[in-house]
Image (cartoon, rainbow, N blue to C red):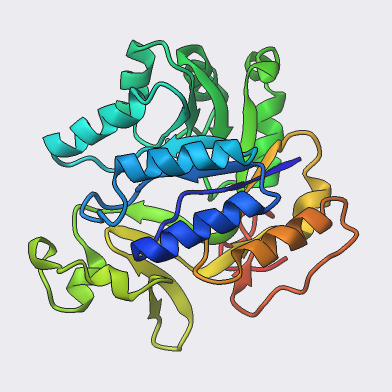
Amino acid sequence: MQFSLGPVQYFWPKPQMMQFYRDAADSNVDIVYLGETVCSKRRELKFDDYFTLAQMLRESGKQVCLSSMVLYEAPSELRELRKYVDNGEFLVEANDVGAISMLQERSLPFVAGAAINCYNQHTLRRLQSMGMTRWVMPVELSASWLDELLAQSIVADIRDCFTTEVLGFGHLPLAWSGRCFTARSENRSKDQCELCCINYPHGRQVKSQDGTDVFVINGIQTQSGYRYNLINQLGNMGTNVDIVRLSPQAEGTFDWLAKFQANINGQAPQPLGSTDSNGYWLNLAGMATG
């Protein structure tokens, strides 16, 4: 089993981003994803910065993927996407079907991100035929669903053609919108947001009337209020999960990476916090802990 660091979901200042990836280079993580996936207005790091980081991480022995955005709304964003697709050196994680189309036109392999709505064996096989070499399972699906899907005959005969990745740690990305919820929470319009999401390195918590952490708003992205944590499920993943992804957090990411790596065989289980959940993986309510 390998471990990956997904792209940073939040808007962090450039010095914080650079330090995070220096720490990633010194860590034992296997795969690192780079790129802005949420909002094109977040320009602390540009494509050239990510490309330089990718080369540095590769030199430190990491496998590197460049991640596309999930929602494209302007021609300028498509021009930026072409830089990722035509980078010439690194695998691309496609989080939008437009990115898949662009990669297929160039006969390039790709990672199908969790935002790609792949829920059945027919879609999975179709993606593989288009060049997919790694599939990130949609975050709301379960272990039993994954086992059943990969056992389907039309998938079983291509199973050696792709690897499967599961998000195992972090707030779950649930939805994206044309509106910016962080700006709205400060009574700003999206066009005059003043990049206020940089003030929320963990996103902005939304509580219900009874005080439950229901959501985290992160610009145009809505995340789960509870942090998803599959650290105690690693020993039950078997051969169907090749890679477990950790979504970067503002603090403690590499401590959690070490804990995950120590518990691959269930030998170092960890207590879950009151706002951790693993319900989707166990086919329970998403906020539940089994």
- Above-or-below relation of 266 to 181: above
Give whichever of 140, 113 is nearer the camera.
113
Q: Residue at x 32, y 52 (%)?
A: 45
Residue 277 can be seen, yes or no: yes
Residue 61 is situated, as x and y percent measured from the top left of the image, at 65, 38
Residue at 13%, 34% in the rendered image: 75
Q: Residue extending furthest right? A: 267
Q: Is 46 drawn above or below residue 150 in the view shown?
A: below
Residue at left offset 71%, top offset 73%:
272
Residue 34 horizontal side relative to residue 14, left or right = right
Horizontal placement of 8 versus 281: left or right? left
Q: In the image, what residue occupies the spot 25% across and 53% down?
A: 43
- Above or below residue 219? Residue 121 is above
Quarter of the image where the C terminus is located: bottom right
Q: Residue 285, relative to residue 123: is it above or below?
A: below
Outermost residue, bottom direction?
Answer: 210
Residue 113 on image: x %, y %: 47, 37
**x, y (%) of residue 230?**
69, 58
Query: Which corner quadrant of the image does residue 72 belong to?
Result: top left
State the residue in front, 166 or 122.
166
Q: Nearer the viewer, residue 121 or 128?
A: 128
Looking at the figure, which quarter contains the N terminus?
A: top right
Any part of residue 247 in sight = no
Q: Nearer the viewer, residue 108 or 72?
A: 108
Judged left or right of residue 42, residue 194 is left
**Image location of residue 131, percent across then percent down:** 48, 16
Q: How many marks?
A: 0
Q: In the picture, residue 289 is in which quadrant?
A: bottom right
